[in-house]
Amino acid sequence: MKLYTKTGLGLATAMAAGLAVPAMAETELTMYYPIAVGGALTQVVDGIVADFEAANPDISVNAIYSGNYDDTRVRALSALASGEPAQLAVMFSIDAYDLIEQDLVLPFEDVATTDADQEWLNSFYPALMANGQIEGQTWGIPFQRSTIVAYYNKDLFRAAGLDPEAPPTTWDEMIEMGKALTGDGTYGLMIPSTGYPYWMFQALAIQNGKEVMSGDGLTTYFDDPTVVETLEFWKSLSIEHGIMPTGTVEWGTLRQAFLEGQTAMMWHSTGNLTAVKKGASFDFGVAELPANVRLGSPTGGGNFYLFKDTTDEERAAALKLMQFMTSPEQAAAWSIGTGYMGVSPAAYETEALKSYTSEFPPALVARNQLENAVAEFSTFETARVRSGLNNAIQSALTGAQEPAEALAEAQAAAVRLLKDYQ
């Protein structure tokens, strides 16, 4: 069999001619990565990986883009189960409990052992570390991270006689402005209720003064009166106040609906920011979510995880890749290219991100909201517990069940699923 270099010469011919043969990478990494939010994220990630490989010619990285977060978890874990090599992945920050329970991942304290490594572990925003730090160990490293922000169409605000620099800061203001903005084929507000309805619901519940789960992943509060009241409020935005469509609002098409003027305000991930910036034909703004009892948003997005079935060399190479991708310069470039936040304070001290946020202040909103952010909803049996909550939310919004009934069923199911862990 004849082996060929990139120049097309046979390996033996190249050696005989005295030509330099490109060195083969000593360590190969497979990284599963979710591409779920709009924008050419593959190009951004490909660029970072290429820069890493150029600086580390002894390491090659195979980035497998695998759909949304749920798709990525399924594909990565299926690969591991079938014996295919995979060393790291970016998966939901809320997958940590399940990954630990299945004994699939390593705590970073096992591999990040030098003083420099420890400094790196301590460099991230604490709110972004909350989902990854469990029982005194670090299981996930922030990368593709977000909070929910409110996008709004300033041109429609002006047309409705509203101050385009004063988006709603309370639920009451949101309703009042929403009514002024609704009409002529445009709704005042859209909050997505497919894809990740639990995430939006957690934001509303926090703003109403109540968490939907305990910090240890063992207890949910779906049937708490304040939580029930929260779902009733969400439903009232369409049924009572008429500022939002009835039924469900699609996560995947909401950004386009906003760009087409179908809604004057939308709640969505900050990961859509760059795509909205590039696609909007109108003046738009970005604001922190409004408060009722308090301000608040859950964090969201993905963390790096290091799989347990790896060699020492692969672990060292994977750690080097993660440290490269989360470095201040790369985190700044990532934030500018996507809209996701820089995961460390140092990222916002880079000249690139300071210059960008000076010219485009909306890029600071998600970061600023970390002051009022909480860990994203996560428990043991996360996927099944979350599915029950998602179904309850959608059942209530579509009128199939009353909010109290739907949430009571979700709570009963969660209690059954979590019983063995308590």
Image: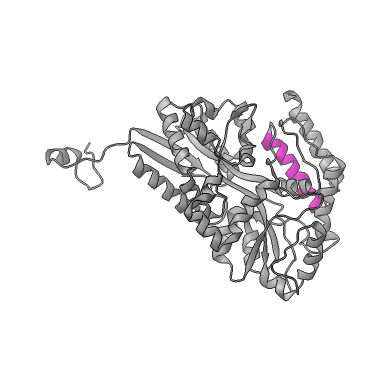
Location of the N terminus by quadrant is top left
Q: Which residues are magenta?
A: 382-399
Q: Quadrant of the C terminus?
A: top right
Q: Is residue 280 left or right of residue 178?
A: left
Whether the magenta-drawn stretch holds residue 415 is answered as no
Residue 132: % across, % down: 61, 35
Asked if residue 328 is positioned above or below residue 106 in the image, the reply reads below
Query: Is residue 189 visible to the viewer in this orientation of the structure?
Result: yes
Residue 282 x/y as whole percent: 61, 71
Q: Nearer the viewer, residue 353 or 196?
A: 353
Q: Is residue 141 left or right of residue 243?
A: left
Q: Residue 16 appears in which quarter of the rendering?
A: top left
Is residue 63 rendered to the left or right of residue 409? left
Residue at left offset 56%, top offset 46%: 345
For the residue pair 114 and 148, the one nearer the viewer reads as 114
Residue 246: quadrant of the picture? bottom right
The image quarter containing residue 13 is top left
Q: Residue at x 72, y 36 (%)?
A: 385
* Position in image of residue 208 (x %, y %): 81, 48
Residue 200 pos. (x, y %): 72, 50
Identify the residue shown where x is 76% and y is 58%.
169
Q: Is residue 392 magenta?
A: yes
Image: 194 above or below 245: above
For residue 412, above or below residue 277: above
Instruction: Identify which residue is drawn at 62% across, 50% down.
Output: 367
Q: Is residue 399 above or below residue 215?
A: below
Farthest left residue in view: 17
